[in-house]
Amino acid sequence: MEKVIVVENLTKAFGRFKAVDQISFEVEKGEIFGFLGANGAGKTTAMRMLCGLSIPTSGKAIVAGYDIRTQPEMIKKNIGYMSQKFALYEDLTVAENIRFYAGIYHVPEKEIAPRTQKLLERLGLEHEKDSLVKALPLGWKQKLAFSVAVFHHPGIVFLDEPTGGVDPVTRRQFWEMIYEATDSGITVFVTTHYMDEAEYCDRVSIMVDGKIAALDTPANLKKEFDANNMDEVFYRLARNASRKAD
Amino acid sequence: MHPEKPIEMKQFISFVRKEFHHIFRDRTTMAILLILPVLMLLLFGYAINTEVKNSKIAVYDPSNDTYTRAIIEKMQASEYFSVVKMLKNEQEMSEQFKSGEVKMVIAFSENFHENLLHTGDAQIALIADATDPNSAKSVVNYATAIIAGYQLESQQLQQIPFQIDTQIKLLYNPQMKGAYNFVPGVMGMILMLICAMMTSISIAREKEMGTMEVLLVSPVKPAMLIIAKTIPYFFISLINLTTILLISVFILGVPVAGSLFWLLALSLVYIFVNLSLGLVISSVVNNQQTALLISGMVLMLPVIMLSGMMFPIENMPVFFQWISQLIPAKWYIIGVKQIMIKGLGFSAIMPQLAVLSGMAVLLIAISIKKFKYRLE
């Protein structure tokens, strides 16, 4: 299998504090990789480095074939990103938001219209095309934000707690969209607080105190920790953490 | 791979278009931005008037001779004063001021005419109510001018050789119109408000809403983001500049005496200073309210108080005079006055242009540095 993310001994220190402490892992093309950890465990710092936003203190990582240290601009062109805060412009219409992100991600002009049409059909938002985003229900906003994040067909999409505050039904629909994205070859790197969502991932890593404490398929992890569900796995690992959640 | 240039351009256009969407969608803010200069000009032009017209004065005239009567007549005849009361004794004077009925009392010494002719020691006291120092000052100035004018006249009639010839000439603004002072002031204030405040708020909003994070992960270059953010406000301030100039020329009767080209050039530099000031502010704040507060407190107040728009800088304590040097609006307002009111050319605004350009370069450098720092 093709490796789209290769991380070796990646470390980020702030003074003497090692937010991320020598983590290593690989993610394969088309995989859904769950990146779990309690608040303060170092998830966000690790993810920021992988997105080219933050320079590592030591170690190396290759994302989408580019070195995060020397080619952050190339990485930015080849990934999609959806943050934990809802990040579309509320005072712009659905179409204007799509148009904007298509523009900054260099989607070819003639592709924009057909892709927009397809996206709206998929979300059932054809009639909301010219509505302001703030008029949409939260669930739709999240689905729209995800669709916008993969609109430019990135190799990898990073989702930072994408389903925060969303009801279970919408979360379910959201995950269907994630599966569809992987079917078209997109790799999904997702952080989440919901342990049921961890079960949907192909593989899950659990960070504790800046280190990766466990990494495997959900089924193997449950077997290894003799747990009934991911919640128990997570609890067994996280209770030993020395860092307090913020 | 496509050539870099057109792609960057497309990215830039998408960004600017988005910024205009934000502004056009927020009708209230846009209306305020466009109407504010008009309101401020009209407010300063008509409501806040420091010009002296028909100020009520009282006269204490114990001599009551031809000279004193002539002077009183002169006062009455001028459009600046109306004599509302003749006082019988000095006691009445303080009562007049206490009741607040008159702005100024003119008191002649006894045997005015006689003294003037023989000893040359005739005295007039101008006693003004200085609770409002600005208007007291102008009332006294006008009265002095009238008396001096009368003295000159009578000197010509009588050929008294030893009297001093006082001539007063008000340069550049012979009618002492307040508009000559506040039009440059309002220009300085409005352009700052729109450029600095709105730019800082618009970037702070991206941070507050979480969209900044998404933009930072995107291939958009920070420099482009910064420029694209400022462009709409650049255009709005050009519109405002035009509105202000049209109103001041056609409604308030303040002409552009000097070169329009250099006035616009100076304004452009000033706009750049404020746009970059807005960027610097936005790099230290994370939400719109703080941005608003900082632009309001840190920018607006000094501009109103220390730029020389309201109060003359020369009258301030040295400490504040020093601070006023740091205020871009101060330099801009002086420059605008040089061109607009005095009709001077490029050489007269060179120091202002130089200082403002220096400030612009410095602030842009700081804002870019700060912005990169935040990326890390």
Image (spheres, coloured by chain):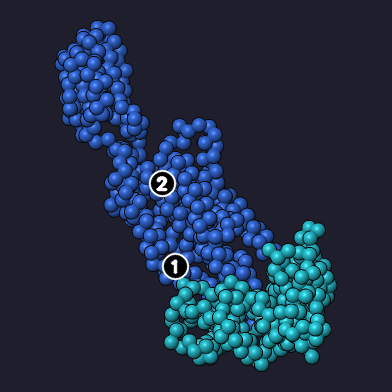
Chain colours: A cyan, B blue
User: Residue furthest toward the bottom?
Assistant: A183
Is B56 on the left-hand or right-hand side of A190?
left
Tag 2, which chain?
B
From the top left corner, tell me how far across and down residue B152 is, in percent: 25, 21
Which residue is pictured at 58% across the width and 69% down the height?
A: B210
Q: Amino acid at mark 2?
A: Gly
Q: Please state which of the two labelled residues, at mark 2 or mark 1, is closer to the viewer.
A: 1
Give the image quarter of residue B84. Answer: top left
Are there few (<14), some (14-19), or many (20+) residues within 10 Å of tag 1?
Answer: some
Q: Nearer the viewer, residue B313 or B213?
A: B213
Q: Please, is residue B245 above or below residue B161 in the view?
A: below
Residue B135 in picture, x, y percent from top left: 32, 33
> Quick check: A7 above or below B234?
below
Residue located beneath label 1 in the image: B23
Whether residue B192 can be seen here = yes
Quarter occupied by the N terminus of chain A: bottom right
Residue at image mark 2: B185
- Give the image location of residue A92, x and y in percent: 47, 75
